[in-house]
Image (tube, grey):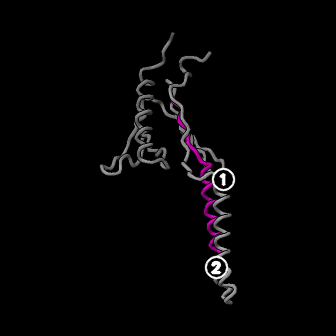
Amino acid sequence: MLEPFDEPIYSTRLSPHRSMSPRAFYLFIVAFCLAQAIFAIPFLVMGAWPVAGFMGLDALALYVVFRISFRDARAYETLDVTPLELIFARVGAGGGRREWRFNPSWVRLEQKVHEEFGTMSVALIARGEAIEIGAFLGPQQKADLVKELSRALATARRGPRFS
Protein backbone atom coordinates (compact mmCIF):
# COMPACT_ATOMS: atom_id res chain seq x y z
CA MET A 1 0.00 0.00 0.00
CA LEU A 2 1.31 3.44 -0.89
CA GLU A 3 1.88 6.00 1.81
CA PRO A 4 -0.34 9.10 1.47
CA PHE A 5 2.79 11.16 0.84
CA ASP A 6 3.90 8.96 -2.06
CA GLU A 7 0.52 8.49 -3.71
CA PRO A 8 0.61 10.02 -7.20
CA ILE A 9 -1.81 12.87 -7.85
CA TYR A 10 -0.89 13.39 -11.48
CA SER A 11 1.45 11.62 -13.87
CA THR A 12 1.93 12.14 -17.58
CA ARG A 13 4.40 11.53 -20.37
CA LEU A 14 4.71 14.20 -23.05
CA SER A 15 5.99 13.09 -26.45
CA PRO A 16 6.36 14.92 -29.76
CA HIS A 17 3.67 14.07 -32.28
CA ARG A 18 4.68 12.28 -35.46
CA SER A 19 2.03 11.90 -38.13
CA MET A 20 3.85 9.20 -40.10
CA SER A 21 4.48 5.72 -38.77
CA PRO A 22 7.70 3.88 -39.71
CA ARG A 23 5.72 1.64 -42.09
CA ALA A 24 4.14 4.65 -43.80
CA PHE A 25 7.60 6.21 -44.06
CA TYR A 26 8.94 3.09 -45.75
CA LEU A 27 6.08 3.06 -48.27
CA PHE A 28 6.48 6.80 -48.91
CA ILE A 29 10.24 6.58 -49.50
CA VAL A 30 9.81 3.60 -51.87
CA ALA A 31 7.12 5.46 -53.85
CA PHE A 32 9.26 8.62 -53.93
CA CYS A 33 12.32 6.74 -55.17
CA LEU A 34 10.26 5.00 -57.87
CA ALA A 35 8.87 8.35 -59.02
CA GLN A 36 12.37 9.84 -59.03
CA ALA A 37 13.62 6.90 -61.11
CA ILE A 38 10.78 7.28 -63.62
CA PHE A 39 11.52 10.99 -64.02
CA ALA A 40 15.28 10.38 -64.20
CA ILE A 41 15.11 7.89 -67.12
CA PRO A 42 14.41 10.53 -69.80
CA PHE A 43 17.36 12.59 -68.58
CA LEU A 44 19.65 9.56 -68.74
CA VAL A 45 18.45 8.80 -72.29
CA MET A 46 19.16 12.41 -73.35
CA GLY A 47 22.65 12.17 -71.88
CA ALA A 48 21.98 14.55 -68.99
CA TRP A 49 23.10 12.05 -66.38
CA PRO A 50 24.04 14.72 -63.76
CA VAL A 51 20.32 15.63 -63.49
CA ALA A 52 19.51 12.02 -62.64
CA GLY A 53 22.27 12.06 -60.03
CA PHE A 54 20.86 15.16 -58.39
CA MET A 55 17.43 13.53 -58.33
CA GLY A 56 19.03 10.67 -56.41
CA LEU A 57 20.52 13.19 -53.99
CA ASP A 58 17.00 14.55 -53.39
CA ALA A 59 15.83 11.09 -52.40
CA LEU A 60 18.85 10.62 -50.12
CA ALA A 61 18.29 14.01 -48.49
CA LEU A 62 14.62 13.24 -47.88
CA TYR A 63 15.53 9.89 -46.31
CA VAL A 64 18.12 11.50 -44.01
CA VAL A 65 15.72 14.24 -42.87
CA PHE A 66 13.01 11.72 -42.02
CA ARG A 67 15.49 9.53 -40.12
CA ILE A 68 16.55 12.57 -38.06
CA SER A 69 12.90 13.36 -37.38
CA PHE A 70 12.21 9.80 -36.21
CA ARG A 71 15.30 9.90 -33.98
CA ASP A 72 14.15 13.19 -32.41
CA ALA A 73 10.73 11.65 -31.75
CA ARG A 74 12.33 9.36 -29.17
CA ALA A 75 12.67 12.35 -26.82
CA TYR A 76 10.00 12.80 -24.16
CA GLU A 77 9.22 14.54 -20.88
CA THR A 78 7.52 13.20 -17.76
CA LEU A 79 5.65 15.03 -15.01
CA ASP A 80 4.84 13.34 -11.71
CA VAL A 81 3.05 15.14 -8.87
CA THR A 82 2.70 13.79 -5.33
CA PRO A 83 1.65 15.74 -2.22
CA LEU A 84 5.31 16.40 -1.40
CA GLU A 85 7.05 16.64 -4.76
CA LEU A 86 6.75 17.58 -8.41
CA ILE A 87 9.28 15.71 -10.53
CA PHE A 88 9.91 16.90 -14.07
CA ALA A 89 12.23 14.80 -16.24
CA ARG A 90 13.41 15.48 -19.78
CA VAL A 91 14.81 12.53 -21.72
CA GLY A 92 16.67 13.37 -24.94
CA ALA A 93 16.66 11.41 -28.18
CA GLY A 94 19.97 9.83 -27.22
CA GLY A 95 18.64 8.66 -23.85
CA GLY A 96 20.25 11.35 -21.67
CA ARG A 97 18.01 12.21 -18.72
CA ARG A 98 17.79 15.47 -16.79
CA GLU A 99 15.53 15.72 -13.77
CA TRP A 100 14.18 18.62 -11.69
CA ARG A 101 12.44 18.26 -8.33
CA PHE A 102 10.17 20.91 -6.86
CA ASN A 103 8.01 21.36 -3.80
CA PRO A 104 4.45 21.73 -5.18
CA SER A 105 3.73 24.40 -2.59
CA TRP A 106 6.47 26.65 -3.94
CA VAL A 107 6.42 25.99 -7.68
CA ARG A 108 4.50 28.34 -9.95
CA LEU A 109 3.09 27.49 -13.35
CA GLU A 110 3.46 30.24 -15.94
CA GLN A 111 1.98 30.31 -19.42
CA LYS A 112 2.41 32.81 -22.22
CA VAL A 113 -0.76 33.20 -24.25
CA HIS A 114 -0.98 34.89 -27.64
CA GLU A 115 -4.47 36.25 -28.30
CA GLU A 116 -4.57 34.80 -31.82
CA PHE A 117 -2.55 31.58 -31.54
CA GLY A 118 -3.29 30.45 -27.98
CA THR A 119 -0.83 29.12 -25.40
CA MET A 120 2.69 29.63 -26.72
CA SER A 121 4.76 28.37 -23.79
CA VAL A 122 4.42 26.78 -20.37
CA ALA A 123 7.08 26.98 -17.67
CA LEU A 124 7.64 25.81 -14.12
CA ILE A 125 9.07 28.61 -11.98
CA ALA A 126 10.79 27.94 -8.64
CA ARG A 127 13.79 29.39 -6.82
CA GLY A 128 14.31 31.94 -9.61
CA GLU A 129 14.63 29.18 -12.19
CA ALA A 130 12.25 28.79 -15.15
CA ILE A 131 12.01 25.48 -16.99
CA GLU A 132 9.90 25.28 -20.14
CA ILE A 133 7.81 22.16 -20.41
CA GLY A 134 6.17 20.64 -23.46
CA ALA A 135 7.87 22.96 -25.97
CA PHE A 136 7.04 20.49 -28.75
CA LEU A 137 3.30 20.47 -27.99
CA GLY A 138 0.70 22.42 -29.93
CA PRO A 139 -1.12 25.42 -28.40
CA GLN A 140 -4.26 23.46 -27.47
CA GLN A 141 -2.22 20.64 -25.92
CA LYS A 142 -0.28 23.21 -23.87
CA ALA A 143 -3.53 24.78 -22.66
CA ASP A 144 -4.84 21.35 -21.63
CA LEU A 145 -1.55 20.62 -19.85
CA VAL A 146 -1.79 23.90 -17.90
CA LYS A 147 -5.36 23.09 -16.84
CA GLU A 148 -4.50 19.55 -15.68
CA LEU A 149 -1.23 20.51 -13.99
CA SER A 150 -2.83 23.49 -12.21
CA ARG A 151 -5.51 21.19 -10.82
CA ALA A 152 -2.86 18.68 -9.68
CA LEU A 153 -0.75 21.37 -8.01
CA ALA A 154 -3.83 22.71 -6.18
CA THR A 155 -4.56 19.20 -4.93
CA ALA A 156 -0.94 18.73 -3.85
CA ARG A 157 -0.99 22.06 -1.95
CA ARG A 158 -3.97 20.84 0.09
CA GLY A 159 -1.75 18.03 1.36
CA PRO A 160 -2.03 14.26 1.54
CA ARG A 161 -5.35 12.55 2.24
CA PHE A 162 -5.39 10.06 5.07
CA SER A 163 -8.18 7.47 5.02
Looking at the image, tell me whether mark 1 or mark 2 is earlier in sequence order: 1
User: What number is the disc on residue 137?
Assistant: none
User: What number is the disc on residue 54?
Assistant: 2
- Which quadrant of the structure image shows residue 129? top left
Question: Foreground: 15 or 108?
Answer: 15
Instruction: Determine if the magenta segment contains residue 55.
Output: yes
Tell me if 79 is positioned left or right of 114 in this view: right
Q: Is residue 125 above or below residue 36?
A: above
Contact between marks 1 and 2 (CB within 8 A): the answer is no
Question: Foreground: 132 or 106?
Answer: 132
User: Can you give x and y, in whole percent of width and height, for residue 43 in the image?
Assistant: 65, 84
Report the residue that reaches farthest toward the top. Answer: 163
Task: Tell me where the magenta segment starts and ends, as one range.
Answer: 52-80
Report the residue that reaches farthest toward the left. Answer: 115
User: Can you give x and y, in whole percent of width and height, for residue 34 in the image?
Assistant: 67, 69
Count how many numbered circles sit on residues in the image.
Answer: 2
Q: In this view, does 114 lie above or below 68?
A: above
Please state, as top left, top right, bottom left or bottom right, where the N terminus lies in the image: top right
Residue name at image x 54 percent, y 17 percent: 4
Near mark 1 (Cα within 10 A), the count class, few <14, some 14-19 or many ≥20, is few
User: What number is the disc on residue 22?
Assistant: 1
Q: What residue type is labelled 2?
A: Phe
Residue name at image x 63 percent, y 69 percent: 61
Question: Foreground: 121 or 29?
Answer: 29
Q: Give me the C-alpha separation between circle 1 and circle 2.
A: 25 Å
